[in-house]
Amino acid sequence: MGYACPVCETPQRDADHLADHLAFTAMLHGDAHEQWLDEHAPGWGEAGTDELASVVVDHADETTYDEVFEESVPDGHDHERSPRTPTFDDGDLDADAQRALAEAREMTRTMLGADDDNKA
């Protein structure tokens, strides 16, 4: 079980996560989350997670919170990527960006190689 955000109903794992969700959303977006906190938890901006959690949990409904664990992911799900497989099509980059990317890749290879040398 978890708690539904009293503003947007997004499920959160526990009271601490609910407090952090409310505070971060309020700080980043203002909106209804900030208004809700101003009304229900005056001084919320100076409160820590534990202090804020003890206040906001009293105003939240319990809800189902589905946890996803690594062992629940079907076999064949692979987090590893080949280091040479770009996550984007670098052919779309202009010449300067391609040179910068090539230099960054070389610096990374050098750095990783230096780490291997230090382990020996």
Image (spheres, rainbow, N blue to C red):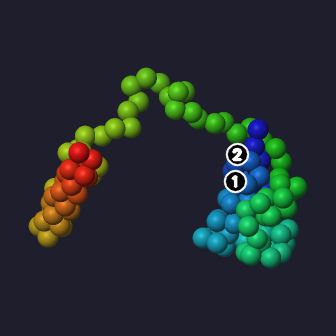
Label 1 is placed on what type of residue? Answer: His
The answer to the question of whether label 1 and label 2 lie on touching residues, with beta carbons closer than 8 A, is yes
Q: Which residue reaches farthest front?
A: 120
Residue 2 in the image, given as x and y percentages of width and height: 75, 43
Q: Is residue 25 above or below residue 72?
A: below
Q: Residue at x 67, y 59 (%)?
A: 21
Label 2 is placed on what type of residue? Answer: Arg
**Residue bearing mark 2:** 13
Quarter in which the C terminus is drawn: top left
Q: Residue at x 25, y 52 (%)?
A: 118
Q: Which residue reaches farthest right?
A: 58
15 vs 111, nearest the viewer: 111
Label 2: few (<14), some (14–19) or many (≥20) C-alpha neighbours in 10 Å: some
Q: Residue at x 15, y 63 (%)?
A: 103
97 vs 104, nearest the viewer: 104
Marker disc for residue 17: 1
